Amino acid sequence: QVQLVESGGGLVQAGGSLRLSCAASGRTFSNYAMGWFRQVPGKEREFVAQVWWSGTTDYSDPVKGRFTISRDNAKDTVYLRMNRLKPEDTAVYYCAVGVGRRATMRVDYWGQGTQVTVSS
């Protein structure tokens, strides 16, 4: 059974930082892209960032320059460092594993989601 276990969400003031982690297990993830999406109630889930097996990264425009995605292939774990957080970043953040596409992913596996709330 494939599982993506997320951690690191929480409440932070605007301008602060958080680091999300997602540990994948249950199969071999060689050559898969790993990334993050986020969703606000009533809106579509949107792509945030992804990192390929090689370490190449891709970010959506709203987070470029503020968020950094990375992965530890030996641990099948992906991280999202979020700096200079804004209230607009408030959302449920979902870890994703699948095939990378330009500015999105074809997602094969989803995490359960972790809440990030940024207060003004």
Image (cartoon, rainbow, N blue to C red):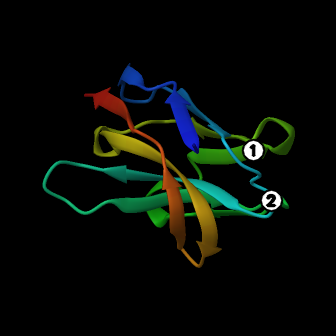
For badge 2, the amino acid type reads Trp
Residue 39, percent across and down? 30, 51
Q: Position of residue 73 (x, y in %)?
A: 83, 45
Which residue is disc 1 drawn over? 71
Name the amino acid, label 1.
Answer: Arg
Q: Nearer the viewer, residue 72 or 80?
A: 72
Relative to 119, say whether 97 is above or below: below
Taking the image as shown, residue 34 lies to the left or right of residue 8, namely right
Residue 54 in sight in this render: yes
* Label ID, residue 48: none
Question: What is the secondary structure assignment of the residue under circle 2?
Answer: loop
Camera-side residue: 27 or 110? 27
Image quadrant where one finds the N terminus: top right
Circle 2 residue? 53
Q: Position of residue 62 (x, y in %)?
A: 43, 59
In this rendering, the answer to whether 98 lies above or below 119 is below
In which quadrant of the rendered view does residue 32 lie?
A: bottom right
Of 102 and 118, nearer the camera is 102
Pointers 2 and 1 in contact (C-beta within 8 Å): yes
